[in-house]
Image (tube, grey):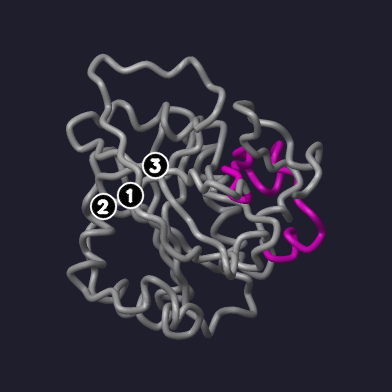
Amino acid sequence: MNNRNDISFTDPLVMRVTRPSPCSYLHGRVEQRLAADIATQPDSHDDLAKAGFRRVENWVYRPICAHCQACKPLRIPSGNPAAGKLELTKSQRRVIRKNAHITRDLLQNRCFDDHYALFQRYLNSRHGDGQMADMDKNSYAAMITSSPIDTVLVEYRDNGELYGVILVDIQNDGLSLVYSFFDPAKQHLSPGSFMIMDCAAVAHHMGLPYVYLGYYIAASPKMNYKAKFKSAEILSNGSWTPLADIASP
């Protein structure tokens, strides 16, 4: 796990170790996870998230790979991207301007038909050979609706047409972006980066200091884009530290 020693629970939390399986992000490597079902202990979630765990349905997990520590939990500060402590590059500011016409709504975490259709198009265009490629509607609905904590959908539309969706957990210190997908035809607008920055604005409006983006993996093209955020912090040796202060593995 990590060196944090300030996590305690009233009732013991049963941890399980998954079987080794091929790594989804680094070719030729094997991944293994430490996982726990928090359905009956939802109050444990936020402390676990600060310690680098991620949520999938009622489970939280974090990698405990025997010969690899490439996965680094990463978060960015919240803030109004136009004027806040979230420091943006010139390129990121251009993304904000290009998406000025995009509208946003916060919705209940339900399974919407148009969301699922967009989810399928997104997977087919970007991750056709990934672990989620065969996810049917029932599995998708479980991912969206099964949550023991406060969870919402952040929906984006472009002149009424569905643009993108993010499944978001609301923690006591921030928003955790669980999973996002968007219209592949909108790639020229950099929707992934835009939605992250917009969620930083949402967190700022809610008075929450951070946005959790999952794991940063320097050697993975799918995961190293998170280093583009200048103010990013990673969990290293039990402490949240500016990514810029730590050499890439």
Q: On screen, 158 above or below 218?
A: below
Q: Earlier in the sequence, mark 2 or mark 3?
A: 3
Sequence-wise first label, 3 or 1: 3
Residue lying at 53% horizontally and 43% vertically, measured from the top left: 212
Identify which amino acid the numbered label 1 is placed on.
Val
Q: Which mark is residue 152?
A: 1
Amino acid type, callout 3: Leu
Query: Residue 76: within the magenta?
Result: yes
Label located before the other in sequence (2 or 1): 2
155 versus 227 height, above or below = below
**Residue 231 shows which numbered tag?**
none
Q: Position of residue 209 (x, y in %)?
A: 56, 31
Q: Is residue 40 left or right of residue 122?
A: left
Q: Are marks 2 and 3 in contact (CB under 8 Å)?
A: no
**Separation of residues labelled 3 and 1 (CA atoms):** 25 Å
Secondary-structure class at tag 2: strand
Crowding around mark 3 (Cα neighbors within 10 Å: few <14, some 14 to 19, many 20+) is some
Whether residue 25 appears in magenta in the rendering, the answer is no
- Disc 2 + disc 1, Cβ < 8 Å: yes
- Asked whether 209 or 222 is in front, the reply is 222
- Taking depth in this image into account, of 13 and 115 the one nearest to the observer is 13
Helix, strand or loop status at disc 3: strand
Q: Which residues are magenta?
A: 70-95
Q: CA distance from mark 2 to mark 3?
A: 29 Å
Marks 2 and 1, how far apart in space? 5 Å
**Disc number for residue 108:** 2
Q: Residue 166, percent across and down?
A: 42, 59
Q: Residue at x 56, y 63 (%)?
A: 29
